[in-house]
Amino acid sequence: MAAHQSDHHHKVSITKTTSVHPKPVPPQTQHTHLLNLSNLDRKCPMLMYLILFYRPTPQNTLPVGSVFNSLKVSLEGVLSVWYPAAGRLALNPTNQKLDLMCNNAGAVLVEAVTQVKISDLGDLSKYKKFYENLVYRPVFSGDFSKMPLVVAQVTMFGCGGYAVGIGISHSLVDGPATFDFLSTWASAASGRVAGGVELLRPVHERGRLLVGQSQIQVHLNRSDVSHGTRVVAFEHLHQMIEQAVATQSVDSHRMLGGCKFSGMGSTNQKEDYVLLTFSVTSAMIDSLKKRVICGRHVNACSSFEVLAAHLWKARTKALGLKKERNICLQFSVDTRNKMTPSLPKGFSGNAYVLTSVICTAARLEETTLEALVEMIREAKGLITNDYVRAYLEALEAPQRALPPLRELTIVSDWTRMPFHAIDFGHGHAAYASPLETPLPQVAYFMQSPNEEGAIDVRIGLHPENVQAFSHYFLTSS
């Protein structure tokens, strides 16, 4: 392992790397325990990274090593309850699918130092290549059994502040479960619970989200299941692929064999995206909402609904998509409270499914914000037990890479997860910055730490589209 990581101007030196194991050893893992994953868990078995920045305060003069030691001891205890986080992914020999081996192999915790001051980084919401030095990236050799599911790097800055760069496997948790895990860890480190955060004991078994071939047949034979349940996310994605195939002369038989959401929009060559953060003020959100509620049919709407509609219009305009092209908005919906009965409180696996809206670029341009919000609401209303079950079954199909889909806009809502409020003992984070995801063009909606009701939007754009998108998106009229 290299002794340091650096960009062109700054250096971050790693001073310590250690494996962290559960203490005490949880009874569930005294003998290796296999946790069956759902098809939602298997979509994207990659580490997703988030960096929490903590500024120095006059009261805090933290010696190097104190934060690291505190996080290590507290993580040991948390892993006793969140024991799958100390495990490893493994291919199930019976079906060759990824499952999770709860074997106490451990998480990885790294300590690093830099002479850079947090103030040198300027606006923390703006992504910088230097951020890549603040996370630990284990090399993946192709053997999942060697890859930790949780890694964290504590970097002490020259000013006395620090950053915690965290990578968590998307096969282990989704966004809400990640927030629950980090909140529990922070509470153990600080000895207090952040205001408004309910610490729940995690439920790791995937339960009703497990769908095997035999289970599928049982479900299909039940009288309460609609055989005609449409999974619009897949239907619309196939339409997008067919459109791309017709334009690019791609082998349709190869492309249409399955929908690989983890590879959506990817190509054999890495595309050139710029990661940008747009701060949408509460005043602008209120202005957008007024345009909607002044209509005849909508009495109120959520910030997510109106901002997703506005972003879809802005991105489509900025990309200059031809008016006759079909365009699609897809967004994730948490099924925890959409299923009947609801998933158990503290459910720690992936519980999000995609839903979808489709129309031509010409229709989108002439459709009012009010009508778009209604379309988004209708798409959200499709999420039922039958939809989730059909979605899980559809993921049984072979997963293949997809062509670039410029006409596809994807939104992920993080606004219910205040990551900046994670407190490891020295107050809230100044900012919580996600790093590039497997789909950099996805728009993430995040709570602003600076203004109540404001939303920060992180999105990847091609450089030639940045100016146009900025104009259309930051104009609410």
Image: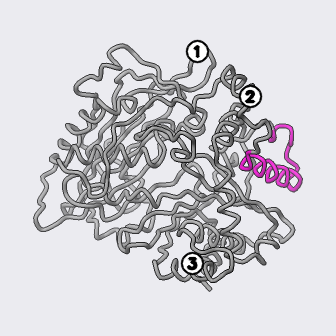
Judging depth in this view, the residue of 170 and 384 nearest the camera is: 384
Residue 136: x and y, percent? Answer: 38, 44
- For this orientation, the residue located farthest to the bottom is 477
Give the image quarter of residue 320: bottom right
Q: Residue at x 69, y 31 (%)?
A: 396
Expressed as whole percent of the image width and height from the top left, the position of residue 386 reads 68, 40
At 60% across and 24% down in the image, what residue appears? 97
- Inspect the image, locate mark 3, and give the three-letter code of the amino acid beneath it: Lys
Report, in whole angstroms, how far the alpha carbon at label 1 lies from the one at label 3: 52 Å
**Residue 93, label in figure:** 1
Q: Magenta segment range?
A: 231-256
> Which mark lies nearer to you, 1 or 3?
3
Image position of 342 with respect to 237: above or below? above
Q: Main secondary structure of the magenta part?
A: helix
The Cα atoms of the two marked residues, 2 and 3, are separated by 42 Å
Sequence order check, earlier mark of 2 and 1: 1
| Residue type, label 2 | Leu
Quadrant of image for the C terminus: bottom right
Which residue position holds label 2? 220
Q: Amino acid at mark 1?
A: Pro
Outermost residue on the front side: it is 223
Q: Which residue is mark 3?
A: 289
In what element is the residue under mark 1?
Answer: loop
